[in-house]
Image: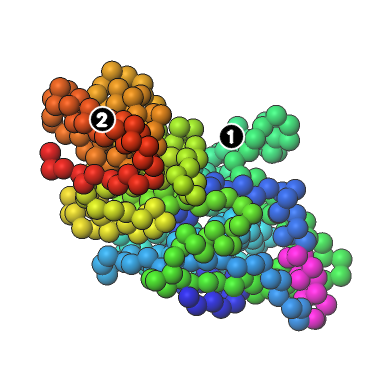
Amino acid sequence: MKSDPFTVQQIFQDRRQYRVPFYQRAYVWTRGNQWERLWEDIRDKADALLQGDDPVAHFMGAVVLEQQQKPGLLGVERLHIIDGQQRLTTLQYVLTALQHVLRQLAQPGLLPLVDGCLVNGNPDTMEEKEVERFKLWPTFRDRDQFVSGMTATTMEDLRTRFPESFTQAKRLKMIGVRHPPTLEAIIYFRDVMFEWANDTKDFDLPSRVMALAKAVLTKLKMVCILLDKEDDAQVIFETLNGHGAELHATDLIRNFIFMRAGNDAVDLYKNVWSQFETTLWSEKQSRGRLNRPRLEWFVQSAVQAETAEEIDIGRLYAGYRRFVDADAKLHGAAPQLALLNRYGEHYKALVTGKGNEPIAVFGRRISPWDASTVHPVSLRVAASELSADAQNEIFGCIESYFVRRAICGLSRKNVSAPRTPDL
């Protein structure tokens, strides 16, 4: 792990892209909670610079980044934002707003510096020009509004692209409309910057614009923590966000899958993965002293059903990656999701006991016992091509085993998982 302090210009000037992983939430910063305070910090630094002072940079905290391997010669350097996506995204909106102000005030001299922090150069050497041109790439939840807002060069462009957010008088609607955060952030920072820069009572316009740009580019600092290959992104995220959103192994697994989805990511998410984000799968289930979302127990069972090997729930993400890496047929997102979807239907029947399929009947009958150790073999049986009668016979043997142990007064803790058979 390496950590160094960087200014905004240093963070964004290199030819690289900061990607927000799938497991991260959507952009949620707002004017009242974060933007106004950030603007006050920028304004204070700009005021000090105008007076000839050299103020200490404002520290915005730390961001944690995970280097991604580039498959070939083409493409820009990619880093996943493990922590700090709200700050980095907001800074992109600040820089875009500064672009608007420089253009509107006819101060183009500083534009190349700002442009270099927003757009990657040399598009001919990119794999996906329309994606890699951006310094930051959000999740699909924010993507459309982000692209529309970041590529608008004038206020008229913004009005055209977000018509529902403006009145007939071309002003941003103030009541009854929830604006896209990208639009609202850009307009807020543009308006306060324009008002400050245009106040030329004591200093001329070029001096004020220079101070404003310098404050944004060089007087805001963050510590960038770059993870090494052996660093555990999940543990680090949870350490930094102990009182915030919890990161589960399945969040990382979801990101691992969808980074391989390409242009099909949105369709696969909506049509396949979204079923795993219902309450059924997020409910916490206890096994001994461990309390995990049901989705984690399911993924563990599905991988064990496929491999007939034990998977440590505490290292589920690493175990899942090893499982996928070892099977060339699973390297794409679609086959991974197909496998999870197939086992998911059986697992749902097993844990709810709903339906007339053999595994559902089996689930109802063994519900009085803690039978989680036989979930993998149960999934393997249900997903096989065995007839319903054959499946019922196998499930009957497993049920008999539990009943006989109960009659003998044996503890359920001593039940070992049967080895998954070749079916």
Q: Is residue 175 magenta?
A: no
Locate residue 267: give its quadrant.
top left
Residue at point 48%, 72% (across, down): 226
Q: Position of residue 74 (x, y in %)?
A: 29, 66
Q: Position of residue 70 (x, y in %)?
A: 31, 66
Please state which amino acid type lies under the numbered disc 1: Pro
Please state which amino acid type lies under the numbered disc 2: Ser
Residue at point 55%, 51% (across, down): 246
Q: Which residue is situated farthest in the front direction here?
A: 408
Of marks 1 and 2, the one in the foreground = 2
Could you tell me if residue 290 is visible in this image? yes
In the rendered image of this protein, does residue 196 appear above or below residue 377? Answer: below
In the rendered image of this protein, does residue 110 appear above or below residue 371? Answer: below
Q: How is the image coloured?
A: rainbow
Q: Which residues are magenta?
A: 41-53
- Determine the secondary structure under disc 2: helix
- Residue 163's tag is 1
Q: Is residue 48 magenta?
A: yes
> Circle 2 is placed at which residue position?
400
| Mark 1–mark 2 distance (CA, rounded to whole Å) | 66 Å
